Image (cartoon, grey):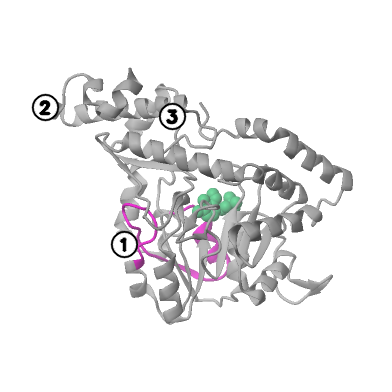
């Protein structure tokens, strides 16, 4: 079983992707070829954002968004420590200071109730992360930003395609920044990403920053980066769009099925999805005690897992200076408990059943070790009725 089944996806899309790659090889415009503008138009239409700027990666999307805001040394950007390093890394690279705010324990997204207390006269932007595929509380975040004159950058690396109050992730704030890393909900075959905005001036700035700050050829009006997305990678994403709507439906179905099957399993907590939004389940992540034991049992049963993420950024050597060690306790706890299960649009019902059965057995074994008197002797006796058939 694959953790993310990219081979099955390619098998289904092979004719279209191969033809698109061949077209690029034939026209030879590997940098800023016609597929770049074609993809940007398709993604802008899909998200509803006025502008889409394709870039070299999700990291580059975040960095370019921050650079477009003209941050000054000492400026602060509020974000979550329970994310991939790129979120805080780009804030530091842009010359600002990351200010970490803890997460909600049930969604693992930034706790908006804690943001305003951390705003200072140096705060320039809020950078929520739409973790695991669910958009953060953007309505409240945008309202806070409006009250304090701040920009909002959604780190949407994991949430492309998600819907929030009827709008698409990436089109719910000043900037939306996504990643086309191969394992993301919409991925390419290397590195890629995109930036979205409705603001004409910021879009122009981002387009210039993407090409070394050029406003026209060899006219470097600002400091930029080499941040373009290759034509070949744009062609791959265009090929993937062919069945992206179907993939989103499958992800929703598989996520709902995991949720139903695991709802009553003792010893596992699930990530909550708020009623005014959905998740594209970039990861299907659960929370368990004794994660090492559970992970080892799943591995022995042939079920691959991953941890997103084992250490919150305020405990990482590179970022610890920006936050006290005890300041984000819920992020610290989540980092000890989260475990991501196999998830992709091509995950079969049979494989999903194997994952759920193996997890249930691992958890009941862990619980009977921890609470021997509280549980029946046989591991399968502890399984809820919904799982009995699966395990049998
Ligand atoms: C939350 C988050 N932000 C940023 C990134 C960076 O994206 P990329 O790997 O395309 O640079 C990732 C990718 O893993 C991510 O998960």
Point out residue 62 in the picture as x, y percentages from the top left corner: 58, 62
Q: Name the residue under label 1.
A: 327
- Asked if the residue at tag 2 contacts the one at tag 3, i.e. Cβ–Cβ closer than 8 Å, the answer is no
Q: What stretch is highlighted in magenta?
A: 83-112
Point out residue 124 in the picture as x, y percentages from the top left corner: 49, 76
Label number found at residue 352: 3
Dot 3 or dot 1: first in sequence order is 1
Q: In which quarter of the image is residue 144?
A: bottom left
Q: Is residue 280 above or below residue 89?
A: above
Please give left or right for residue 361 compared with residue 314 in the image: left
Q: Distance between the residues labelled 3 and 2?
A: 31 Å
Q: Distance between the residues labelled 3 and 1?
A: 37 Å
Q: Count neighbours of disc 2 (C-alpha within 10 A) and say few if under 14, some if 14 to 19, many if 20 or more.
A: few
Label number found at residue 373: 2
Q: In the orientation shown, which residue stands out farthest toward the left?
A: 373
Q: Count neighbours of disc 1 (C-alpha within 10 A) and say few if under 14, some if 14 to 19, many if 20 or more.
A: few
Q: Count neighbours of disc 3 (C-alpha within 10 A) and say few if under 14, some if 14 to 19, many if 20 or more.
A: many
């Amino acid at each position: 079983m694959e953790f993310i089944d990219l081979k099955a996806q390619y098998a289904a899309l092979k004719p279209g992707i191969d033809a698109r790659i061949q077209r690029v090889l034939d026209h030879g415009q590997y940098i800023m070829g016609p597929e770049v503008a074609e993809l940007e138009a398709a993604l802008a239409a899909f998200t509803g954002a006025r502008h889409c700027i394709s870039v070299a990666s999700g990291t580059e999307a975040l960095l370019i968004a921050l650079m477009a805001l003209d941050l000054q040394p000492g400026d602060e950007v509020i974000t979550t420590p329970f994310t991939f390093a790129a979120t805080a890394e780009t804030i530091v690279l842009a010359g600002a200071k990351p200010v970490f705010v803890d997460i909600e324990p049930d969604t693992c997204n930034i706790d908006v109730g804690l943001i305003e207390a951390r705003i200072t006269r140096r705060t320039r932007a809020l950078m929520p992360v739409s973790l695991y595929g669910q958009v953060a509380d953007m309505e409240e975040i945008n309202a806070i930003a409006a009250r304090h004159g701040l920009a909002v950058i959604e780190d949407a690396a994991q949430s492309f395609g998600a819907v929030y109050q009827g709008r698409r992730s990436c089109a719910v704030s000043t900037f939306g920044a996504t990643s086309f890393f191969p394992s993301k909900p919409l991925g390419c075959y290397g590195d890629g990403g995109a930036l979205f905005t409705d603001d004409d001036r910021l879009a122009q700035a981002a387009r210039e920053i993407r090409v070394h700050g050029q406003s026209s050829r060899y006219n470097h009006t600002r400091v930029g980066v080499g941040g373009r997305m290759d034509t070949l990678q744009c062609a791959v994403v265009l090929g993937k769009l062919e069945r992206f709507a179907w993939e989103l439906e499958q992800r929703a179905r598989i996520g709902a099925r995991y949720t139903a099957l695991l709802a009553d399993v003792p010893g596992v907590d699930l990530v909550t999805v708020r009623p005014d939004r959905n998740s594209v389940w970039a990861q299907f992540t659960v929370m368990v005690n004794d994660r090492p034991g559970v992970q080892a049992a799943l591995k022995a049963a042939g079920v691959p897992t991953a941890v997103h993420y084992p250490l919150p950024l305020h405990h990482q050597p590179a970022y610890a200076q920006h936050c006290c060690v005890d300041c984000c306790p819920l992020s610290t706890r989540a980092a000890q408990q989260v475990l991501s299960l196999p998830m992709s649009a091509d995950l079969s019902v049979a494989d999903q059943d194997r994952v759920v059965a193996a997890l249930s057995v691992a958890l009941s074994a862990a619980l009977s070790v921890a609470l021997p008197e509280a549980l029946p002797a046989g591991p399968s006796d502890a399984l809820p009725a919904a799982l009995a058939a699966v395990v049998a």
